[in-house]
Image (cartoon, rainbow, N blue to C red):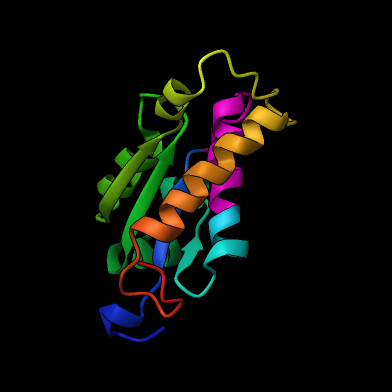
Amino acid sequence: MTTNNRERKIIVMPCSGIGKVHGLIAREATYAVTDDLAPAGFETLCLALLVSGDEEALAKVREADCIAIDGCPKLCAAKNVEMAGGKVVRSIRVVDSFKNHRGAEPGTATTLADDGWTIVREIAGDIANGICGHCESGVK
């Protein structure tokens, strides 16, 4: 990674959300962006490393723009990025995605159903197509 901001990847930081379907959706949306849709422009870090004070994780977050994906309104991912000295350029709440999917049955904390995967694709697509105007991938 270079020191030029235009070549630096954006960090997508999902909440841990263990035991909740909203957390699983946050993590799967992150992997969809970083592994499939726009790996040249995005990467992710483990929130636990950041919270525990891992020096490498802290340094990465402080040097990059970050997108936080939080499962619930507590905004743990966004708050922890900011507490670590990172810049959250966008904060996404999975619960807000459900407003467009009234009555959706997303699955469980360990397995997503079709509705859950639909929400994952929407969040991931929105990130990959809407925020990264400076990535190598050419995503706008």
Query: Residue 135, located in which quarter of the rendered image?
Result: bottom left
Instruction: Identify the residue at horizontal 61%, vertical 37% (top origin).
Output: 118
Q: Position of residue 129 (x, y in %)?
A: 42, 59
In this rendering, the answer to whether 11 lies above or below 26 is below
Above-or-below relation of 103 to 12: above
Q: Nearer the viewer, residue 10 or 135?
A: 135
Q: Quadrant of the N terminus?
A: bottom left
Residue farthest top in this picture? 103
Q: Nearer the viewer, residue 6 or 130?
A: 130
Q: Is residue 10 visible?
A: yes
Give the image location of residue 33, x and y in percent. Answer: 54, 58
Q: From the viewer's perspective, is 49 left or right of 35?
A: left
Measuring from the top left, give residue 68's x and y in whole percent: 38, 46
Q: Is residue 53 visible?
A: no
Q: Which residue: 31% across, 69% down? A: 133
Label total for image:
0
Residue 74 image point, x, y percent: 36, 25
Range of magenta residues: 16-31
- On whether residue 56 falls in the magenta region, the answer is no
In the foreground, 74 or 56: 74
Dominant secondary structure, magenta: helix
Residue plotted at (35% across, 32% down)? 75
Q: Is residue 92 above or below residue 57?
A: above
Residue shown at the point (51%, 43%) measured from the top left: 122
Judged left or right of residue 83, residue 40 is right
In what quadrant of the picture does the C terminus appear?
bottom left
Tell whether position 20 is magenta.
yes
